[in-house]
Image (cartoon, rainbow, N blue to C red):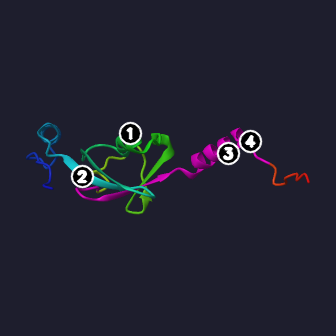
Amino acid sequence: MRPPPERSNGNYDREACLSRRENAKTSGEGVIRIRVSTVSQWHDISIQATSTFGELKMVLSLLTNLEPEEQRLLFKGKEREDEEHLHMVGVRDKDKVLMLEDPAIKERKLLGLARTQIIGSPYRTIRV
């Protein structure tokens, strides 16, 4: 990645950086392919490098049936916040991201299922 253009006084030219970023978006140059690992499967996803982890969660929700708030995304061993941009934390083409289901939400789901299911008695009456 090349450094942003500088003005004669040494400050970065913000407009040039933004226009180059927009050009990359419209020409498709900013698209990266990420391999997302869940516990049981892999998903290869093409997404803009300037996307956020929250946007990645939205894409993953379509593939995994887990709502974005139920997902935890880890990159380089750290959980990432929804507002963080992929390119700002170093996600590059062909990198791997780990997706886990939030354990607190998973537990709430399981408790909800246990309440709705009729739990049978461990004892049975036998008639002779």
- Circle 3: residue type: Leu
For discs 2 and 1, the disc positioned in front in the rendered view = 1
In the rendered image, which residue does mark 1 sit on? 62
Give the CA separation, mark 2 to mark 3: 37 Å
Looking at the image, tell me whether mark 3 or mark 1 is earlier in sequence order: 1
Instruction: Find residue 84 and report its horizontal and vertical position in percent.
Output: 36, 47
Q: Residue at x 33, y 43 (%)?
A: 52
The picture quadrant where one finds residue 55 is top left
Q: For the residues labelled 2 and 3, say whether their Cβ atoms are less than 8 Å apart.
A: no
- Circle 4: residue type: Ile
The magenta span reads 91-120
For discs 4 and 2, the disc positioned in front in the rendered view = 4
Check the image and report above or below for 13 versus 1.
Answer: above
Looking at the image, tell me whether mark 2 or mark 1 is earlier in sequence order: 2
Position of the N terminus by quadrant? bottom left
Instruction: Find residue 107 and report its horizontal and vertical position in percent.
Output: 62, 49
Looking at the image, tell me whether mark 3 or mark 4 is earlier in sequence order: 3
The circle drawn on residue 111 is: 3
Q: In this view, does 27 lie to the left or right of 53?
A: left
- Circle 2: residue type: Arg
Q: For the residues labelled 4 and 2, say whether their Cβ atoms are less than 8 Å apart.
A: no
In the rendered image, which residue does mark 4 sit on? 118
Give the CA separation, mark 3 to mark 1: 25 Å
Q: For the residues labelled 3 and 4, say whether their Cβ atoms are less than 8 Å apart.
A: no
In the rendered image, which residue does mark 2 sit on? 33
Give the CA separation, mark 4 to mark 2: 45 Å
The crowd level at tag 3 (other Cα within 10 Å; few <14, some 14-19, many 20+) is few
Position of the C terminus by quadrant? bottom right
Instruction: Find residue 34 and report its horizontal and vertical position in percent.
Output: 28, 53
The crowd level at tag 1 (other Cα within 10 Å; few <14, some 14-19, many 20+) is few
